[in-house]
Image: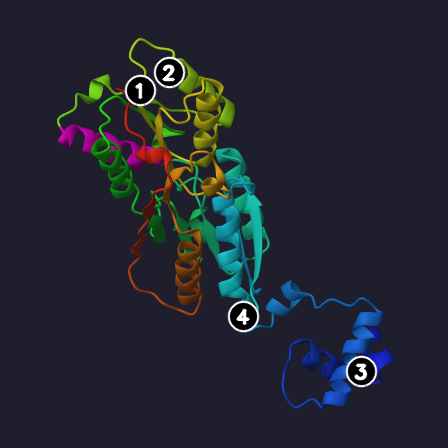
Amino acid sequence: MRHVAKVAGVGIKTVSRVMNDEPDVSEATRQRVLDASLRLNYQLDMVAGSLRRPGRQTLSIGLLLPRVANPFSSRLHRAIENALTPRGIAVFAASMDDDPDREKALVAAFLGRRVDGLVLTPIARSQIHTIPEHSRALPMVFIEREPLGIDADAVVTNNAVAAAHAASHLLAHGHTRLAYLGDRADIQGERRRGFTGELERAGLYTYRIPVREGLHNEESARQAALELLGGNEPPTAFFSSQHFITFGVIRALKELRLSRKVALVGFDDFALADMMDPGVTVIAQHPERIGKVAAERLLARIDGDDRAPETYVVPSELIERGSGELSPAP
């Protein structure tokens, strides 16, 4: 800052006022300071500045995502950035790759950088061991799952209701031999319960409905679908609990030339779903809305909102594109 002041021909306090965008600085002086900072590649030290800022805010938050490559995660990230950038708040994002140990380490890294709040999509069963007790007063919002062991706001999709809608949609098109393919049961259990619960209400014997969980990637989903399709009573319809499982089912159906004979409804929309043959019917979450609500709640907490934590439910919608509207072969 001293170097910038010397090059611009002003005092250090003037440099500070310009860099913090404070008033009472002439435009000519402001421009000289900015030009000097560019020439010297000067960046304001936000952490040092936070020591003098009310509440010691660093104007940053930590965002922990399951997988950065996941389309849902990327759209969620953008929505949160769009909401926080006008407030001058930077978003530090990291991917935990569905690893509870990595989740804990990344939370610790965020806390070590004195972020003003956290937005978390938790993978651990309980957050008691993820969030240190001395940090639990920090503003935080959970996405996709309500926290266990910690009191905090959560923003979730209506998972059980949405999955039940998928089941009733397939039943309405004449399917009675259905299969559920999912990832971790502790995370996506609401989707499985919603799906099988609707089948039970329709009078189907759910013990005869194949459920395959613990499918952590596209290939494992493909193998599970191929196994079921090669059985004595192959399913005439699949419900997949998230996008990469949907991709695995699509590959299996394509290999067996069953894309137009076996129905599919996937949870989570994805790019080019409407360009497939047939187009893929999905339960579409709305990550933009989820991210906006999460950011609004986090800002409210940062600004001092001390109401009891709440869970906010963002509705999903079923988008018909063809794959979920196929009837079983006679």
Q: Is residue 174 above or below residue 297?
A: above
Q: CA distance from mark 2 to mark 4?
A: 51 Å
- Identity, as a three-letter code, of the amino acid under mark 2: Leu
* 107 sits to left or right of 227: right
Q: CA distance from mark 3 to mark 2?
A: 71 Å
- Residue, x 49% and y 19% (percent of image)? 255
Would you call the spot at circle 3 few (<14 residues within 10 Å), some (14-19), or many (20 or more)?
some
Q: CA distance from mark 3 to mark 1?
A: 71 Å
Question: For mark 4, what is the residue?
Answer: 86
Count up the numbered dots: 4
Q: CA distance from mark 4 to mark 3?
A: 25 Å
* Residue 235: assigned label: 1
Would you call the spot at circle 2 few (<14 residues within 10 Å), some (14-19), or many (20 or more)?
some
Q: Which mark's residue is nearer the viewer, 2 or 4? A: 2
Question: For mark 2, what is the residue?
Answer: 229
Q: Secondary structure at mark 2?
A: helix
Q: CA distance from mark 4 to mark 1?
A: 50 Å
- Identity, as a three-letter code, of the amino acid under mark 3: Arg
Please identify the quarter of the rendering in which residue 239 is found: top left
Please identify the quarter of the rendering in which residue 296 is found: bottom left
Q: Secondary structure at mark 1?
A: loop
Would you call the spot at circle 4 few (<14 residues within 10 Å), some (14-19), or many (20 or more)?
few
